[in-house]
């Protein structure tokens, strides 16, 4: 779980930089499918970004890890990401 939360927070930090006014909707979909959807939906969402084989394999491993989390913590991570993205620190 620590790996998934760390990845999420780093991702949000990158998305909330002063150079970006909002999170890319396609990227947001990748994160949502990572935490809330099926492995095939996650892979389909990632394909928009043309990942190489190593990236696909790493994403699949991450998805397997995330899927071991109970539903409630996954929902809480999504809520946290939304809260961070909407905060004044990201706008």
Image (cartoon, grey):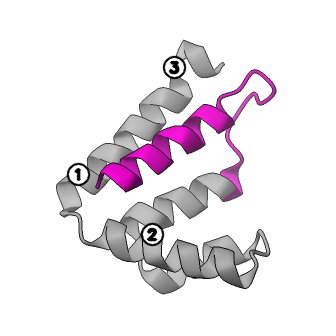
Circle 1 residues within 10 Å: few <14, some 14–19, many ≥20:
some
Front tag of 2 and 3: 2
Q: Is 9 drawn above or below residue 29 in the view shown?
A: above
- The residue closer to the viewer here, 42 or 61, is 61
Q: Which of marks 2 and 3 is nearer the N terminus?
A: 2
Q: Do the residues labelled 2 and 3 touch (CB within 8 Å)?
A: no
Sooner in the amino-acid sequence: mark 1 or mark 2: 2
Give the percent coordinates (x, y) of residue 32.
48, 59
Residue 15 shown in magenta: yes
Residue 5 is one of the magenta-drawn residues? yes
Q: Residue 73 carries which label?
A: 1
Q: Name the residue under label 3.
A: 87
Residue at image position (68%, 51%) is 25
- Dot 2 corresponds to which residue? 62
Q: Residue at x 43, y 29 (%)?
A: 83
Residue 47 position within the rendered picture, expressed as x and y whole percent measured from the top left: 71, 77
Horizontally, residue 78 falls left or right of residue 85, namely: left
Residue 72 location (% of width, % of height): 19, 54
| CA neighbours of label 3 inside 10 A, class few (<14), some (14 to 19), many (20+) | few
Left/right of residue 35 with respect to residue 47 in the rendered view: left
């Amino acid at each position: 779980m620590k790996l998934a939360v760390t990845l999420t927070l780093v991702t949000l930090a990158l998305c909330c930089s002063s150079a970006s006014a909002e999170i890319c909707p396609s990227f947001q979909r990748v994160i949502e499918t990572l935490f809330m959807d099926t492995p095939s939906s996650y892979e389909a969402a990632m394909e928009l970004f043309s990942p190489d084989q190593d990236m696909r394999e790493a994403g699949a491993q991450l998805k397997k890890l995330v899927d071991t989390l109970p539903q409630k913590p996954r929902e809480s991570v999504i809520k946290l990401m939304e809260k961070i993205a909407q905060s004044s620190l990201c706008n």
